[in-house]
Amino acid sequence: MKLTILRIAFVGLFLLGAVWATQQQDFSKVEIKATNVRGNIYMLEGQGGNIGVCIGDDGILIVDSQFAPLADKIRAALKQLNNGNLKFLLNTHWHGDHTGGNPIFGKEATIIAHTNVRNRLMTEQKRGDRVTPPAPKEAWPVIAVESSLTVHFNGEEIKVMHFPNGHTDGDCVIFFTKANVVHMGDDFFVGRFPFVDLASGGDVEGLTKNIAAVIAQLPPDVKIIPGHGSISTLEDLKSYHRMLVETVAVVRKGIKAKKSLDDLKKAGFAEEWKSWGTGFIPADRWIETIHQNLSTKKN
């Protein structure tokens, strides 16, 4: 019971917006670490989703913004990379650990995201008893992507592509084509079971399909920035996709065999995937998510 309560609390922490996070978390000891991915593309790690950075003569473009209380630290880290102005902020999806800094950076940069991200940031979001209030106007994307959009900046062709109903209903993957770098947002957790936000239009089969579609577009030597975790390779992403295919198939087979959710949890997954449940989403919760998602479908 205690473990279940802790897991629920941690999920709530991950999902709630920047206002809640500001009140509940101590960001004073968080350090922002910058790592060169390739060429003029960097990754910033702090607390929350990984930030992608493109620097050059045109200034700075970032992908996602972590939490508002970290804005000054993020700004300082960016200044160490480039003295130019922040011009663009791209959001991979709407969750607060990726958009919490939007109200700060949105005052100086043009925010770009999928239409559903704009809609969710503009309105109150509910998950059971949890309520995330609308974000301030400064946090709203001013350019809304439907299927795709290209930004030409710092000599880069930056493609923003929407992949529907995966992690959420507003996911965008960011392709830095010249540098051969891709920012996946929370469509990709490195070596861990994913969080599929069913309340925000997420779908386990949709995520599996989307990852396959991304893989088909990537060259072998691509560098991948995940939503959470370290810089990764195409092989890492293929392993993640295989995990999705196999674990979803296990639960689907169990549902067809009329097994209960408890039975599925007790059986778990193959030994190969045991370590994947040691992160944010334990195996039991991933099984619950798959079961809930598949059980609501006719087939």
Image (tube, rainbow, N blue to C red):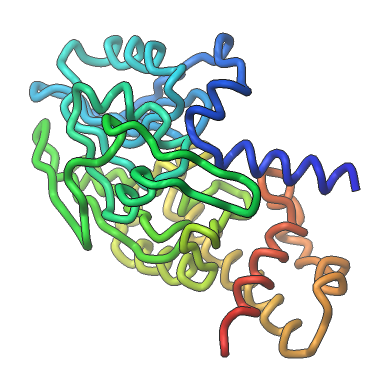
**Percent coordinates x, y for residue 287 in the rendering:** 72, 65
Q: Nearer the viewer, residue 238 or 279?
A: 279
**Percent coordinates x, y for residue 135 in the rendering:** 38, 35
Question: What residue is at 67 percent from the left and 81 percent from the top?
Answer: 252
State which quadrant residue 223 falls in: top left
Question: What residue is at 40 percent from the left and 21 percent from the top?
Answer: 34
**Percent coordinates x, y for residue 251 in the rendering:** 70, 76
Question: What residue is at 51 percent from the left and 73 percent from the top?
Answer: 205
**The C terminus - image quarter:** bottom right
Number of numbered callouts drawn? 0
In the displayed structure, would residue 153 be above or below residue 237? above
Question: In the shown orientation, is residue 191 left or right of residue 164?
Answer: right
Q: Residue furthest right?
A: 1
Q: Nearer the viewer, residue 51 or 198?
A: 198
Question: What residue is at 73 percent from the left and 51 percent from the top?
Answer: 282
**Percent coordinates x, y for residue 116 in the rendering:** 33, 55
Question: In the shown orientation, is residue 142 left or right of residue 231?
Answer: left
Q: Nearer the viewer, residue 224 or 61?
A: 61
